[in-house]
């Protein structure tokens, strides 16, 4: 009987040991499963987060590209619509008033002045601080206005009484900075477009150029004098140029080349006159497009003294187009594209074009 009892005690101890060992195995297994589950969950969450970040970045890039494309289309459509309206406007005053109205997306405040006999007269305005302006303003009392008329170039000036006159200073605010753009008809400034606030200068300059072109079509042409392009000590090049435009560097210095008799506008045929005027318009539009669509590259080129290096592709394309569509159509054509690049982009400083700039078309 004692032997049976001892056997039972021995079985009980083994059962206890087995139960403890089993419990330990279960605990170890549960811990291992928990660790594996935790690692799997962490990895899955990290992967999902990574995929989510990638999807978010892709969506952000797509949205940015779509927004940029919509903006480009909106800007292009707006400019095209304004240019169409300018081409259709039937009067000079209508063209100038449309310039003030249509530039609203590109400038906070604006005024259009007509220049006549040393005076400026307000024709249209938008969003000025004061509308109490005199009938006329003497250019002698407004240095910035006078500078635009004399140089035919856009300028930027503080809207102080000495720069833009007392009335215009009050209208724009004496502490504001104004951009002044000439509206020129055949090289003569007949109007000034003033703008301040949030500006897109490239668009404003393009529209003022377009307004000037429309005025040229509306104003009867007065035959301007033409003269051969010459440089001191060099033979004439045989080209002709509208008086008032800066003379380009001659394309040749061949001393055996015959001199050219000075021509007047009336010496040209009606066909050649139209070709010259069209070539001037083409050159102005192309250079205005450089300023509008490639303003950053243009600024870098001016800063580096190498405008041609920054705009090589655009300038070469414009030169090829001008050669085929303008230079090739008239034996006495002037390289107006070169003149406009030199005047408008390099401010008549040929050094800014860079040493690789090929110069005027032959």
Image (cartoon, rainbow, N blue to C red):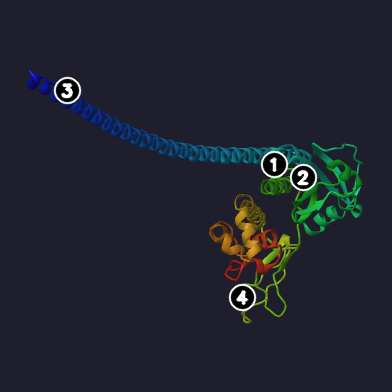
Which residue does the numbered mark 1 point to in the structure image? 106
Q: Nearer the viewer, mark 4 or mark 2?
A: 2
In the image, taking residue 16 as reference, residue 106 lies left or right, namely right
Whether the residues at callouts 2 and 1 have beta carbons within 8 Å, the answer is yes
**First of labels 1, 3 by sequence position:** 3
- In which quadrant of the rendered view does residue 170 lie? top right
Which residue does the numbered mark 2 point to in the structure image? 195
**First of labels 2, 1 by sequence position:** 1
Along the viewing direction, whichever of 172 and 224 lies nearer the viewer: 172
Which residue does the numbered mark 4 point to in the structure image? 252
**First of labels 4, 2 by sequence position:** 2
The span from disc 2 to disc 1 (Cα, nearest Å) is 9 Å
Residue 66 x, y percent position in the rendering: 51, 38
User: Considering the numbered disc 1 on the image, is that residue within a helix, a strand or a loop?
Assistant: loop
Which residue does the numbered mark 3 point to in the structure image? 12
**Residue drawn where x is 61% and y is 72% of the image:** 251
Whether the residues at callouts 4 and 1 have beta carbons within 8 Å, the answer is no
How many labels sit on residues?
Answer: 4
Q: Nearer the viewer, mark 1 or mark 3?
A: 3
**Residue drawn where x is 77% and y is 56% of the image:** 152
Q: Residues within 10 Å of mark 1 (few under 14, many from 20)?
A: some
Along the viewing direction, whichever of 331 and 175 lies nearer the viewer: 175
Q: Is residue 69 above or below residue 352?
A: above
In the image, taking residue 176 as reference, residue 83 lies left or right, namely left
Residue 353 x, y percent position in the rendering: 63, 66
The span from disc 2 to disc 3 (Cα, nearest Å) is 103 Å
């Amino acid at each position: 009987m004692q032997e049976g009892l001892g056997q039972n005690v021995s079985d009980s101890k083994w059962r206890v040991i087995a139960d403890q060992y089993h419990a330990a195995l279960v605990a170890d297994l549960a811990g291992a499963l928990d660790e594996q589950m935790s690692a799997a969950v962490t990895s899955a969450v990290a992967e999902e987060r990574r995929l989510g970040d990638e999807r978010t970045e892709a969506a952000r890039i797509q949205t940015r590209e779509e927004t940029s494309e919509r903006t480009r289309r909106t800007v292009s459509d707006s400019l095209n619509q304004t240019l169409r309206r300018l081409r259709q406007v039937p009067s000079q005053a209508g063209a100038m008033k449309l310039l003030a109205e249509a530039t609203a997306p590109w400038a906070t405040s604006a005024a259009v002045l007509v220049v006549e006999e040393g005076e400026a007269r307000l024709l249209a305005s938008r969003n000025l601080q004061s509308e109490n302006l005199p009938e006329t303003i003497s250019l002698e009392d407004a240095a910035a206005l006078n500078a635009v008329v004399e140089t035919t170039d856009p300028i930027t000036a503080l809207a102080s009484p000495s720069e833009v006159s007392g009335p215009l200073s009050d209208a724009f605010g004496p502490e504001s900075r104004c951009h002044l753009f000439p509206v020129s008809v055949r090289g003569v400034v007949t109007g000034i477009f003033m703008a301040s606030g949030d500006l897109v200068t490239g668009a404003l300059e393009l529209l003022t150029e377009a307004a000037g072109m429309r005025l040229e079509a509306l104003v009867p042409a007065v035959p301007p004098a033409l003269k051969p392009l010459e440089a001191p000590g060099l033979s004439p090049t045989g080209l002709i140029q509208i008086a008032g435009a800066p003379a380009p560097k001659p394309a040749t210095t061949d001393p055996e080349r015959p001199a050219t008799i000075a021509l007047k506008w009336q010496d040209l045929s009606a066909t050649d006159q139209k070709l010259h005027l069209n070539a001037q318009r083409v050159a102005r539009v192309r250079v205005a497009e450089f300023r509008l669509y490639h303003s950053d590259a243009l600024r870098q080129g001016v800063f580096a003294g190498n405008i041609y290096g920054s705009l090589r592709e655009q300038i070469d394309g414009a030169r090829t187009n001008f050669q085929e569509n303008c230079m090739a159509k008239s034996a006495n054509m002037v390289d107006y594209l070169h003149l406009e690049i030199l005047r408008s982009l390099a401010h008549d400083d040929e050094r800014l074009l860079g040493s690789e700039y090929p110069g005027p078309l032959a």
